[in-house]
């Protein structure tokens, strides 16, 4: 089934953002796929939110609108290497919440993709966060608005600068 929103890593922060996106009906559950290696985590997310789940990160990466990266920062290079091996035709907006992974590293790893680095803080988990966003060079004004819309559910304000 075609998906609009893919997420790699369905942990604490990914779930917090996803739950609000679904609550606010930005996406329907059928629009969303999350990849995560842990079967218990996948089962939980599928049961709780009615979304699609997979172990295959490439499945999340072929979402038509957004690919959100929500893994631990040390997993980033593994994801980049894994996806580079596949011939992926879609170039969704890549939204990364990975602490310490710079915009430059994101644009290098996801060469040719529009990339936005976002940095939510922990209160985002209860919908009271504040998020800094840093758009890459290939991001259109519409995609910046899309990134803000996606984050609006969990933050109260944004700051835009190069991180
Ligand atoms: N928590 C915060 O307050 C906060 C705030 C701002 C930014 N962030 C950023 O958010 C990101 C996620 O943090 P988190 O606290 O949500 O971590 P987390 O709960 O550990 O979530 C990460 C998820 O990714 C999964 N994963 C591991 N390897 C993977 C792979 N190769 N492919 C797909 N999924 C994989 C993990 O599964 P396993 O557990 O089985 O390894 C886990 O379910 C981090 O980069 C962090 O810097 C977090």
Image (tube, rainbow, N blue to C red):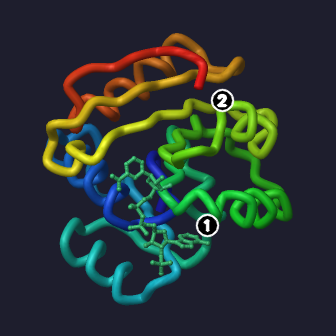
Query: Cβ(mark 2) to ligand 1 < 8 Å?
Result: no
The image shows a total of numbered marks equal to 2
Residue 121 is left or right of residue 47, and the answer is right
Location of residue 53 by image quarter:
bottom left
Front-most of residues 89 and 93? 93
User: Which one is earlier in the sequence, the residue at label 1 or at label 2?
Assistant: 1
At which x and y percent is residue 83?
A: 75, 60
Tell me if mark 2 has few (under 14), some (14-19) or many (20+) residues whose alpha carbon lies within 10 angstroms of its own: many
Location of residue 27 by image quarter:
top left
The residue sitting at 29% across, 48% down in the picture is 17
At which x and y percent is residue 61?
A: 61, 55
Q: Which residue in the protein does label 1 denote?
A: 57
Residue 118 is left or right of residue 102, and the answer is left
Q: Secondary structure at mark 2?
A: loop
The residue sitting at 53% across, 62% down in the picture is 72
Q: Which residue in the protein does label 2 denote?
A: 114
Location of residue 75 by image quarter:
bottom right
Front-most of residues 129 and 19? 129
Quarter holding the C terminus is: top right
In the displayed structure, would residue 39 be above or below residue 105? below
In the displayed structure, would residue 40 be above or below residue 159? below
At which x and y percent is residue 28?
A: 26, 50
Query: Cβ(mark 1) to ligand 1 < 8 Å?
Result: yes
């Amino acid at each position: 089934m075609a998906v609009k929103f893919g997420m790699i890593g369905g942990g604490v922060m990914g779930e917090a953002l996803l739950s609000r996106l679904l609550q606010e009906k930005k996406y329907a559950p059928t629009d969303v796929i999350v990849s995560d290696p842990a079967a218990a985590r996948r089962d939980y997310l599928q049961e709780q939110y009615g979304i699609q789940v997979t172990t295959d990160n490439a499945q999340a990466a072929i979402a038509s609108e957004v690919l959100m990266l929500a893994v631990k920062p040390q997993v980033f290079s593994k994801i980049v290497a894994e996806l580079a091996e596949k011939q992926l035709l879609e170039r969704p907006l890549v939204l990364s919440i990975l602490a310490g992974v710079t915009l430059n590293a994101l644009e290098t790893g996801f060469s040719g993709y529009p990339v936005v680095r976002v940095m939510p803080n922990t209160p985002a988990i209860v919908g009271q966060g504040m998020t800094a966003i840093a758009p890459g060079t290939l991001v259109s004004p519409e995609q910046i608005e899309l990134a803000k819309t996606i984050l609006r559910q969990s933050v109260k304000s944004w700051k835009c600068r190069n991180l």
